[in-house]
Amino acid sequence: MKRFGSLIILFVLVGMISCNENNKTETTMEKETVEVQQPKKEKKTVIARVFVKEGQEAAFTEVATTLLHATRAEEGNISYTLFQSTTDPKEFIFYEEYKDEEAFKAHGSSEHFATFANAITDMLAKDLIIEDY
């Protein structure tokens, strides 16, 4: 019987050591640092809010329409849409999507964008609000 009791104690000790070894492995694994790279953001989305002076709505729409057609022809442009507020006709929003940051930069340095920017300077009631995502 003494021998049987010794065997049980031996099994319990081996089991405890084995469990402790497993716990050590888990603890070691928990402390390992895994480097995760953020996914590359491909698409660039921009919302540009424009506020024009009263009486400048038609002139702004004309110049903006020219920009709209030229921008839609850009290689990196996905979409380019102009909205006019239903509550205040002096407020406009450009909703713009580009395939990536480089396409957006190309748009910003294009001749048609420079022409647009120069044409609207005196039409603006306040600074544009540009949001990018």
Image (cartoon, rainbow, N blue to C red):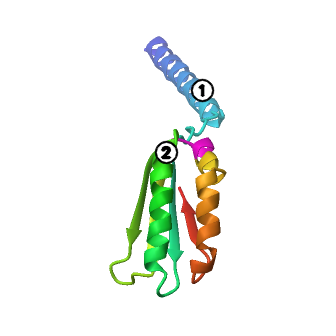
Q: Residue at x 51, y 71 (%)?
A: 49
Mark 1 secondary-structure assignment:
helix
Which residue occupies the foreground of this view, 62 or 19? 62
Q: Indicate yes or no whether the magenta region holds residue 84.
A: no
Depicted 24 relative to depicted 104: above or below: above
Q: Which residue is mark 2?
A: 77
Residue under numbered circle 1: 25
Residue 24 picture quarter? top right
Q: Residue at x 45, y 79 (%)?
A: 57
Foreground of the two, 64 or 76: 64
Residue 126 location, quadrant: bottom right
Would you place residue 69 above or below residue 14 in this image? below
Amino acid type at image mark 1? Thr
Tell whether 37 sits left or right of 80.
right
The residue located at (61%, 36%) in the rendering is 37
The residue at 58%/63% (across/down) is 116
Residue pushed farthest left?
86
Magenta highlight range:
98-103
Query: Mark 2 is on which residue type?
Result: Asn
Classify the position of the N terminus by image quarter. Answer: top left
